Amino acid sequence: RLSMSKAADLAKFIGGGFSGKVLQVVSTNKTDKTDSTDFDASFENVSGLTVNITPSSTSSKIYVIATLQVSVHAYHLTFRIARGGSTIVEPSAAGSRMLGMAHIYGHSNFNDVYNIESKVMQVLDSPSSTSELTYSVQGKNANNPNTTALVVNSTNNDADAAYNSRVISTITAMEIAG
């Protein structure tokens, strides 16, 4: 016969009182189309691609994965996942290059108005917090601020025709036991 303390120990053992266990998952699906998002030279949120999670322990890690479906015509854009609007991780600086987790360029001489690219970004964050955290997909256009012909979840052309598509973008955050 198991005592309450033994049952609790057994439950902890079976239930994974160990690091690496997924403790909670939250996700946001962006199903609408966003037209002509104009990004500045600084990172800004992509509308509708934000998720909130409250870690249960300061030792927890948060694994965030985002899939951004984007079409752009004639501009360079860089994207990242941010926590509270701030950088979590970025590549080494290299001159005047934009730093982020994904990049897109649509050239005006090609048929890019009919192309949708999937930009998948992921990061394992160690926030050391039990407060609510906000993760978001952000974009920036340092070369031509506020002139971006960017469309999320659709082709840039978006004519009502069988050759065009509408798609979804997502962001998911998972608390991982530390």
Image (spheres, grey):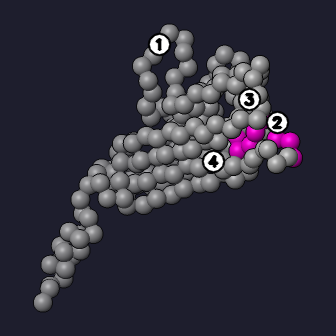
Where the N terminus falls, by quadrant? bottom left
Tell me the crowding category of disc 2: few under 14, some 14 to 19, or many 20 or more residues within 10 angstroms, Cα based.
some
> Which residue has dot 3 on it?
112
Name the residue type under label 3. Answer: Asp
Q: Residue 117: where, in percent of width, then height? A: 64, 37
Q: Which residues are magenta?
A: 152-160
Residue 45: assigned label: none
Q: Residue at left 79%, top 44%?
A: 163
**Magenta region, mostly helix, strand or loop?**
loop
Q: Residue 109: where, in percent of width, then height? A: 77, 19
Residue 94: assigned label: 1
Left or right of 126? Residue 47 is right
Q: Nearer the viewer, residue 43 or 13?
A: 13
Farthest residue, direction left = 1
**Alpha carbon of mark 1 to alpha carbon of mark 3: how far?**
28 Å
Secondary structure beneath dot 3 equals helix
Q: Residue 138: where, in percent of width, then height? A: 60, 35
